[in-house]
Amino acid sequence: MSVMSSPVEFLELLAREAAAVEFEGPLVAARAAGLPPDRLAELEQAKVVALRVRALLERRRRRETELSGLYDTASDLAGLRDLDDVLRAIVHRARILLGTDVAYMTLNDDERGDTYMRVTDGSISARFQRLRLEMGDGLGGLVAQTGTPYATANYPEDDRFRHTGEIDGGVGEEGLVAILGVPLRLGSSVIGVLYAANRSARPFAREEVSLLVSLAAHAAVAIDTARLLAETRSALEELSAANGTIRAHSTSVERAAAAHDRMTALVVRGGGMEDVAAAVTEVLGGALLALDAEGRRLARVGEIEEPDRADIVEAVAASRTEGRSVRRGPLWYAAVVAGAENLGALVLRPDDELVDADQRILERAALVTALLLLFRRTVAEAEGRVRGELLDDLIARPLRDTDALRSRARRIGVDLDAPHVLVAVGDDAFAETGSARQRVLSWATTYASTRGGLAAARDGRVVLMLPGQDAGGAARAVARDLSRVTGRAVTAGASGPSTGPASLAVTFAEAERCLTALGALGRAGQGASTAELGFVGLLLGAVGDSGDRDVTRFLTATVGPVVDYDARRGTALVKTLEAYFGVGGSLARAAEQLHVHVNTVTQRLERVGQLLGADWQRPERALEVQLALRLHRLRTPAG
């Protein structure tokens, strides 16, 4: 510097924003040049003024920077909508504006009555980030409680605050020393605390406190705005959901009304179960299974497996008790009832969840199904009466106009000139009540009509006329299936085949004689035909009601001693006699058939002679013995 140093040089230093140390340069040069003391004093005064001006300009620049930062913060916060984004932006801006190592925010928990760490910036300690401060504890708890800013240059050694092990541990793990905390105010309420902290000792100037307070004020407004936006968004979402629910309900009501109209039309035009099932699945989606009271399938639309019988029974019982459809796993069940009578069930596997209106559709479908089943039953009963009356006329004596009978049969799909067998059902199929008899007749009517035959009640007995030529097979099938329905063993006698109206009465009489013969032979609960019983069955059938007593007396008098001897001694005299007569009286062939020695056969026959008398082999006695053996065998078919 030249010896011409003057105060102007300090203006030049201010103009180029020189560092504070450079303002000593003119004085050093002046002293080196040997300027007089008055000049040196003048330069010293100019330096002091210049440094004050420099400090003022620095503060104004810093204030401008802070204001710009606050403006930018407000602008940034105004563009944020998510509360988490708002909080992170506030804390980050606080750390940048104050130039601290860490910035963080706690929010008050009104339910627990404390304040908790909500968001941090620059933090490295997980323990610190999980801190909760009771009101009045630590610097933050005191700020939250009093609503007043607090600052400390050395928190661990500052005894103005109530230290706790948890707080000091978290602060120590984070390494914080200098901490400034200001309240987040919303009106008169404190909602949290905003902090700036350093990991080294540092005093906070009033300007920094003021800056953080201003930032906290912006932050509180932004937080409240974000909260209001969130509440508004939530309210809009709830409103939208409610509107969607209303629209869905309206749609389901319209769908239910359309389904009701469609199913009503089905009833009016005489639709069937498949139509009902199709209508339900088209409206509700998924697959549907319609079952009768016995669990048999009436209709199925879509892919759905039949549930276990026990599951069906339990679900239908629950549906009847509750008076509405019930859910079991992925399936919905609706009982099909008419009064107290169970007619079946609808089983639905929907694609989507059912609302109340959808359940009403399923329940209405169950009601329509009940109407259709009752209508079908009424039609079947009317048709059954027509078919029963025709069969009753066919087996009556004397037979009326055969051409008229053929014409009546053709109208219901029966060809009387095709082979038919007649099956007479025993009285053991009926319980004491008339309803049980009607149930058997209803079953027989359905059983016969589904096979193209007829069924009727005749003299208190049920008779079926079935197409085919296997009388014995038909009798056994009827006995087996009807036994399952009634829960008791049922006897069925059959005869045939018969062709043409004129022979049906005779065939029916033979079926009745076969039924009587089965009872006389002790074979109740079985099914057989006259051809299978042979001449013995016909003979017994002709005896009448006293046949069983007569057969017993005949067997006792003819082969009774031999049967009793076998029963007492465990011998095989009856079997030996059957083999002996079966091979035409040949001892050798009988022994071969019995797998014994000839002498054994001889000894057994000698014992028979002792029991029956020496004349048991005379032709007339031998015939009686053979007949008695056959009767005994028929009475004990498993023997």
Image (tube, grey):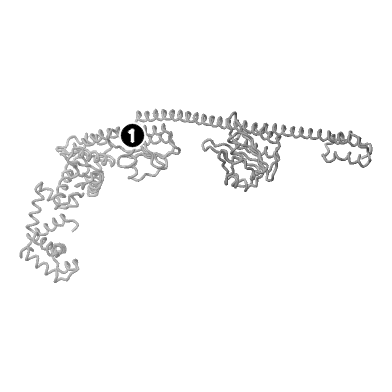
Residue 592, image x and y in percent? 19, 68
Report the amino acid beneath label 1: Gly
Q: Position of residue 145 (x, y in %)?
A: 58, 35
Residue 99 in the image, given as x and y percentages of width and height:
71, 40
Q: Residue furthest front?
A: 37
- As drawn, is 154 to the left or to the right of 526? right
Q: Quadrant of residue 123?
A: top right
The residue wearing badge 1 is 323
Q: Residue at x 30, y 37 (%)?
A: 343
Q: Residue at x 81, y 34 (%)?
A: 52
Q: From the viewer's side, name the closer residue of 392 and 198.
A: 198
- Dot 1 crowding, Cα within 10 Å, few <14, some 14–19, many 20+: few
Quadrant showing the C terminus: bottom left
Residue 308, visible in the rendered structure: yes
How far across and how far down the image is residue 617, in percent? 8, 63
Q: Quadrant of the N terminus?
A: top right
Can residue 91 be seen here?
no
Relative to 255, 76 lies left or right: right
